[in-house]
Structures are given as C-alpha cells and as structure tokens.
Image (cartoon, rainbow, N blue to C red):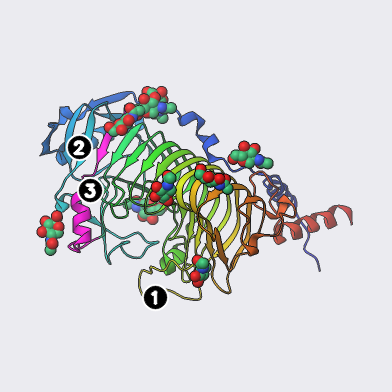
Amino acid sequence: MRRSVNLWEFLVILASIGEVQWVVGSCSSFEQTRVAVLRPHSVSITEFGAVGDGVTLNTKAFQNAIFYLHSFADKGGAQLFVPKGRWLTGSFDLISHLTLFLDEGAVILGSKDSGNWPVVDPLPSYGRGRELPGGRHRSLIYGSNLTDIVITGENGTIDGQGFIWWDWFRNHTLDYTRPHLVEMMHSKGVLISNLTFLNSPFWAIHPVYCSHVHVQNVTILAPPDSPNTDGIDPDSCTDVCIEDCYINTGDDLISIKSGWDEYGIMYAHPCSDITIRRVIGETQSSAAVALGSEMSGGIKKVHVEDLQIFNSKYGIRVKTSPGRGGFIEDVYITNLVLMNVEIAIGFSGQYGEHPDDGFDPTALPSIKRITVKGIIGENISRAGVLEGIEGDDFSDICLSNVTLNVTSELPWNCSYVQGYSDLISPEPCEPLREKIPDWSVCYKPGNKRVASRKTIQLVEDVVELLFI
Ligand SMILES: *[C@@H]1O[C@H](CO)[C@@H](O)[C@H](O)[C@H]1NC(C)=O
Ligand SMILES: *[C@@H]1O[C@H](CO)[C@@H](O)[C@H](O)[C@H]1NC(C)=O
Ligand SMILES: *[C@@H]1O[C@H](CO)[C@@H](O)[C@H](O)[C@H]1NC(C)=O
Ligand SMILES: *[C@@H]1O[C@H](CO)[C@@H](O)[C@H](O)[C@H]1NC(C)=O
Ligand SMILES: *[C@@H]1O[C@H](CO)[C@@H](O)[C@H](O)[C@H]1NC(C)=O
Ligand SMILES: *[C@@H]1O[C@H](CO)[C@@H](O)[C@H](O)[C@H]1NC(C)=O
Ligand SMILES: *[C@@H]1O[C@H](CO)[C@@H](O)[C@H](O)[C@H]1NC(C)=O
Ligand SMILES: *[C@@H]1O[C@H](CO)[C@@H](O)[C@H](O)[C@H]1NC(C)=O
Ligand SMILES: *[C@@H]1O[C@H](CO)[C@@H](O)[C@H](O)[C@H]1NC(C)=O
C-alpha cells in the first residue's frame, strides 16, 4: 500500500522545491559586515602594561586585557586597541564579541621562542598534526567556540617572524606542527579586514569548523621560498567570503580544505558556499586557488571570480589522491587573468601525502561539475595538466572561453577525466574536446539544481495524493 502524504510533509516538499534554485555568492550575505561593528567599550593594550619596544614580551598584557573585556561581552562587546609600536607576544586567545584593532603602524610580533606557542590537540579531521604526529603549536591569535569576532585596523601588521620556524622546519628540529598566525575554530561570525599579515610560520589565516567568515582587503606576504606559507585556508567551513586581497607567499594563496584521509572521512565536515573574488597575487611554488589536497570531508559550492595571477606555478589546482575519499563538486571559476604562469589549470589525482598507514586506498574522491569560464593568459607554459585517477570519477569538467598564449609544444595533457569545452585556444585535450552540449550538464550558479531521486519520489507522491 502506498504511504499517504500529510500536510506537514507537503509543506516540506514545497520548501525543498523552492530551494532548487539558488545562487552561489555568499559574499552578498556579508553586506552588513562591510563596516566593522562599533563596540561601545574600548581599551588600549597599554593600559595593561604592554610595552611596544619589540623586545618586551607582552603575552600577559594581551591575556589580561582580554580577560578584563569578558565582562563587556553581553553589553555589545568591546574593542582591544593596539596603537603604533612593535608589540612582541606569544600566542593568546580571543573571546566572543571582541574587536582587535591594530592602528596604523601597529605591529603584533610573534615571539621567536617556540615555548611561547603552546601545543594544542590535533584537529579531529586530521587525526594528527599536518607535519608531525601528535599536537600542534597554537596559532599566535587563536579562538575557539566564539561568535562575533573582528580583527581589523588601519593596515596594522601581524608579523609571525616565521624565519626561525622555517629554519627549524628545514633542519628537522621541530617536535610539533608549525603554528598559524590566526586560527579560529568552531566559531561563527568572523571578520578579518584592513590588515597586513607577514611571515607566518605556517598557513597565515586558518578558519576551521567555522561559518560566516569574511576576509576582506588584507595583504598577506611571505618570501617565495618560505615553506607551506599558504595565505588563507578555509577548512571545513561554510559561508566564507574572501575578497579584495593581495597575497604573495611561498605556497597556495588560498586553499580550500576539509580534513585528511580516514580522519576527514569520519569527521565528515564539508567546506561549502565559499566565494573568492577580486584577489591579486603570486606564488612561485604553488597555486593561486587550490582545492585540497585535504578534502576528505568534501568541498562543494565554490565560486571564484576576478583573479589576477602573476609569476605563479599554477592558476587553479585540484589536489587529491586515492585514500582521500570525499568530493569536490559544484565549482565555478570565472574571469581570470594570468601572466607568467607555468600551468593554468592543474588536476593532481595522485597527490599522495597520507597521515599514516591507516588510510583506505580504495576510498576514491569524487570530482564533478567543475566549470572554468573565461581565462586569458600571457606567457603560460602549459594550458592544462589534468590527471585524474584510473577507475575514478572526474566528470563534467567544463571549460569555456579560455585563451592562453602558451609556450609549450604540448599545451594539454589529460588522463582519466571527462568533460566538455567551447571556445578554447589552444585546442583542448581529447577527453575535453566534446562541445558543451547544453549548460545544464555543466555547473553554473543559478542553474536549476538537478532534482534528486528523493525529491522526484516525493513530488510523485504529492501528485498522486492530490490528483489520483
Ligand atoms: C576598512 O577601512 C576602510 C577605510 O578606513 C573603511 O572604510 C572600511 O569600513 C574598513 N572595512 C572594514 C571591514 O573594517
Ligand atoms: C566547541 O564546539 C565543538 C563543536 O560544537 C564541541 O565539540 C566542543 O566541545 C566545544 N569546546 C568547548 C571548549 O566548548
Ligand atoms: C583597505 O585597507 C586600507 C588600509 O589597509 C585602507 O586604506 C583602504 O581604504 C581599505 N579599502 C577598503 C575598500 O576597505
Ligand atoms: C599596508 O602595509 C603594507 C606593509 O606595511 C604595505 O605593503 C601596503 O602597501 C599597505 N597598504 C596600504 C593600503 O596602505
Ligand atoms: C636549526 O635551525 C635553528 C634556527 O636557525 C638553529 O638555531 C639550529 O642550530 C639548527 N639546528 C641544526 C641541527 O642545524
Ligand atoms: C614567462 O614566464 C616564466 C615563468 O613561467 C618566466 O620565467 C619568464 O621570465 C616569462 N617570460 C617573459 C618574457 O616574461
Ligand atoms: C571571453 O572572455 C573574455 C575575457 O575574459 C570576455 O571579454 C568575453 O566577453 C568572453 N566571451 C564570451 C563569449 O563569453
Ligand atoms: C604569444 O605571445 C608572443 C609574444 O608576445 C607573440 O609573438 C605570439 O604571437 C603570441 N601567440 C599567440 C598564439 O597569440
Ligand atoms: C602526460 O601525463 C601522463 C600521466 O600523468 C604522463 O605519464 C606523461 O608523461 C605526460 N606526457 C607529457 C608529454 O607530459
């Protein structure tokens, strides 16, 4: 006997049909945060005994100031003002409803003593530190389980003095994974704007398990040969907007992640609804925008537009491996200008790097519905090196309107990928040569999402209930 549909289920079905049409563009939900919130109360770090001479260690002053500001959290929050000066400190913790404001000429300097960067637990979605087993050094500015955090200023600087960490990393004298400049965990409503981030020991800005994260108008710099100094790495986050930034570092400028192999698969926190726009940058060793390689919790609904990429190894790069599991789906990349870039589009299906021997080599990632529309490039060595995984699904890759001045005799090399293209110069590799049959097979924001089997079944139930 057929199950009948009650009114409640009918309303749920209507709502789910209403959702079928959506537009990626999570930056639009941030209009109200364009101007950092004004806090009714403000204190200066100098009121807590801090000395801005670049020598005195001010960790206690930061901790005491923030402890004092706790009492304003339920009164609209408070601002901690950092004036001009060089404020040396170890790692410190933020609280909810706080604005950390760095005035013009204010520099927060990370201590060169690793003892001032306490060791914290590894992330559950990584199972261990990214570089070494066990814990990891806590970031210089850290926050967990917070809401409404603003880190901003008048182009003040957060300088990690990473040189010492890069030496320790290169000569293998570290016991734990290197720290970030800013890490926010399990937090909602994070705004980072109008600042410069210099010489991070590791990735500069790392929001993980967060939602509503807005990074706007920041400059992130590290030398081209500094190891793993990614710019911004949204990791298992939803609703992230990164815009109007200049990033020039030693690794990926922006890398979207969601956990590592069996740990990421088990934790299952995808990274979704990510918008990246109006970013300018260069990276001699890596990509302007990378997806992965840690993507085991899944990555979906990523919208990238208006990038200018110079003197870089890769423009866009998908990085994954057998053992990762997870997925990268529904990605739309548009309007890129590339100059002096080795590989415009790269897919690396054998990236390797596993946390331990416990990964499942049969856990293959699903890579689907990736659209790249509108690239112009000058002095590009290779247009695309797209390497999928034998027996796996890298499908509905759509390329449109790509015009590259390529120096290599073999501009494309593709294996184990399937897709479509139009208006591509130089002519694309064979697996992508089929003309885009119609835009419904390619991912495009605003396209009607293909109704799921479940939705179709529910709609059939309703039709039957109402009309039969
Ligand atoms: C950044 O600074 C500009 C100029 O001072 C200001 O208008 C803007 O509101 C600031 N943006 C944020 C998000 O703090
Ligand atoms: C922070 O939030 C996470 C996720 O909700 C939770 O598992 C964890 O216990 C919380 N930590 C603290 C210290 O409250
Ligand atoms: C960006 O930040 C700089 C200072 O870092 C400021 O002068 C400028 O007005 C900001 N621009 C916007 C659009 O917020
Ligand atoms: C902000 O400061 C950085 C480093 O001091 C500098 O390179 C950049 O030009 C400054 N930006 C603005 C808008 O003043
Ligand atoms: C490693 O580098 C650090 C920082 O430069 C240095 O102090 C240390 O002596 C080096 N250790 C070895 C074993 O090379
Ligand atoms: C072309 O780009 C490469 C880097 O991929 C660079 O080394 C070379 O100098 C560039 N050539 C010109 C003429 O700019
Ligand atoms: C192709 O891209 C160029 C620049 O990226 C743009 O000006 C042009 O309008 C695009 N053409 C089509 C047919 O989309
Ligand atoms: C690529 O650029 C070079 C140098 O500017 C130029 O001579 C060549 O004609 C260009 N090739 C194409 C296919 O546009
Ligand atoms: C193309 O890629 C395949 C597989 O990744 C590799 O074995 C081959 O050497 C590449 N060919 C060229 C010409 O780069």
Specify start and end residues of the magenta stretch as a single range: 155-176
Tell me the residue that label 2 is attached to.
62
Query: Based on the displayed image, in which of its 4 quarters is residue 358 positioned?
Result: bottom left
Mark-to-mark CA distance, 1 and 2: 41 Å
- Badge 2 density bin: few <14, some 14–19, many ≥20, Cα 10 Å: many
Tell me the element at label 2.
helix
Describe residue 29's horizontal placement relative to residue 5 as left or right.
left
Confirm whether the magenta stretch covers residue 173.
yes
Query: Based on the displayed image, in which of its 4 quarters is residue 190 positioned?
Result: top left
Which of pointers 3 and 1 indicates the residue nearer the eye? 3
Describe residue 134's horizontal placement relative to residue 429 as left or right.
left
Confirm whether the magenta stretch covers residue 123.
no
Tell me the residue that label 3 is attached to.
162
- Image spot of residue 454 (x, y percent): 70, 60
The residue at the point 72 percent across, 56 percent down is 435
Amino acid type indicated by mark 2: Phe
The quadrant in which the C terminus is found is: bottom right
Tell me the residue that label 1 is attached to.
358
Going from the N terminus, do you reach mark 1 or mark 2 first? 2
- Image spot of residue 382 (x, y percent): 51, 56
- Badge 3 density bin: few <14, some 14–19, many ≥20, Cα 10 Å: many
